[in-house]
Image: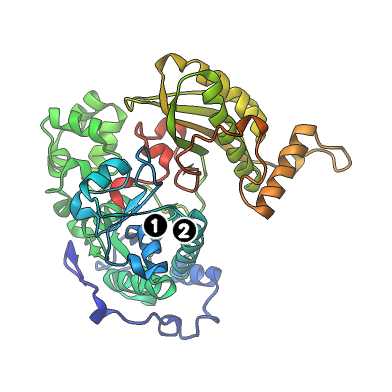
Amino acid sequence: MFSSGQVEDLGEKSRKRYNFKNFFGVSRNAALAKTDIEQRLLNMNTAGDTRWPHIIAHADMDAFYASVEQLDNPELRGKPVLVGPRSQRGVVLTASYEARPFGCGSAMSIAEAMRRCPHAVIVPPRFERYTKVSARIMRVFDNFSPRVEPLSLDEAFIDMSGAEDLFGPPAAMGRRIKDAVREATGLNVTIGLASTKHVAKIASALHKPDGLTVVEHAETRAWLAPLAVKRIWGVGPKMEARLHALGLKTIGDLARSDPRTLALQLGQHGTHLHDLANGRDPQQVESSRREWSIGSERTLEQDVSTPEQIEVHLRRAADRVSARLRNKRLHARGVRVKLKTTSFQLHSRQARLDPATELGEVLFRASRNLAAQMIRFGPFRLVGLAAFDLAAVEADTQLDLFAEPPRQNRLETTLDKLNSRFGRDTLKRARDLERNGTVMGTAPTLDFRSSLPPDEEPASDRSLEGEDPGWD
């Protein structure tokens, strides 16, 4: 087993073909069903000082969107690739590792990225393709554990606790996951393994791309100590500045600090950070995370400042969000509007919905009222809408079988079917014609999902973008 923090270089010489027969004694097609695997894991004897209390893997695909584009188009391999819209106002969704030495990265403006790397190739995103590849990756993870918690299209936690008898020690687990993903997709994944989710995520971020980092349970605090406090999951620039003001520069500084002082200075969050710095993280891998919000946001080619201009984009966002709610059989009890000014100041307002709804018309009317409260801060370069506090639409809340559905519900359901059959935006509203000011369509990272309650979401754009640009 690797020593704490040791990284294995998995180059071509060390790659081995993933073979389910080696793991289970059966072929892949006859592999154990997930329920059988789970029962075996639960029945295993996990006694012994050498075993960790939990074995958590954090798997993070390397420059996912760019890597998929290079996989599908050999001409892009070895070249700096920027996945994003061909617009000076657009934002880089992913930069390939060939572009990163020039300082290009996710969430950077296309204009700035091209200034730093003029010979970069801009590739418009293909979100349907990324979603299909992501589904294949998640199926690979499912073959290793019944407890998989996706965080986004390209990363997930995998609970490998008790699986040593199936896959070997943590280092071997990581190698096998990496080999399996590569065989299934042709892509590289970086793996971090630790005894908690928090430390596993930090570990995977330290050695990219194609890395494997194992943090021994007994050495967790020592491994964390020299790292900067910004490495803690959830510590953004503002919290980092507050911690620095308290003289806390490293995770070790934070771990050694007085938790009572932290609680006084930072409230409950201070106590939580102190626990994380000491390697304590009670969060378990949740194989069925509740989605708290679904939304859509757009960076605009031209700034908007009037209610009429903003409402065009709110209407489109409401239509997209409502379609996704119906597809997942969810309804929302709240709606939130996000507007970003030309000076990149972020403003948001939210409201409760009673009764809960999945109708785009209802979401739009509520969002229009919220946007009116922020109109004085314009002009705006980005418009976003999210439906939050989601719940399943229960069968007993549906309309009577023989009752005719309301006109609006019938209209939106029909539009869903047309768009599903013939493609998104098959039909457009008359008011939208000749008024298309969007840089790009929405998709999984722009049509975002969040598993955090609204009062726990970060204050940065990341909460609406659906992925953490700094960890790609």
The disc labelled 1 sits on which kind of residue? Tyr
Q: Position of residue 319 (x, y in %)?
A: 62, 37
Say how the picture is coloured: rainbow
Is 333 left or right of 177, judged from the image as shown? Answer: right
Q: Is residue 400 left or right of residue 436?
A: right
Q: Is residue 127 above or below residue 336?
A: below
Of 274 and 79, nearer the camera is 79
Label 2 crowd bin: few (<14), some (14–19), many (20+), radius 10 Å: many
Pointers 1 and 2 in contact (C-beta within 8 Å) = yes
User: Who comes first in sequence, dot 1 or dot 2?
Assistant: 1
**Displayed quadrant of residue 241:** top left
Nearer-the-camera pick, 226 or 471: 471
Extreme residue in the right direction: 402
Give me the residue at 42% from left, 25% from top: 380
Q: Residue at x 52, y 34 (%)?
A: 386
Q: Which residue is mark 2?
A: 130
Which residue does the numbered mark 1 point to in the structure image?
Answer: 65
In the depicted structure, whether residue 232 falls above or below residue 68: above
Query: Considering the numbered disc 1 on the image, is that residue within a helix, a strand or a loop?
Result: helix
In the picture, the quarter occupied by the N terminus is: bottom left
* Left or right relative to 42: residue 327: right
Residue 41, compared with residue 114, is above or below; it is below
The residue closer to the viewer here, 309 or 139, is 309
Residue 342 in sight here: yes
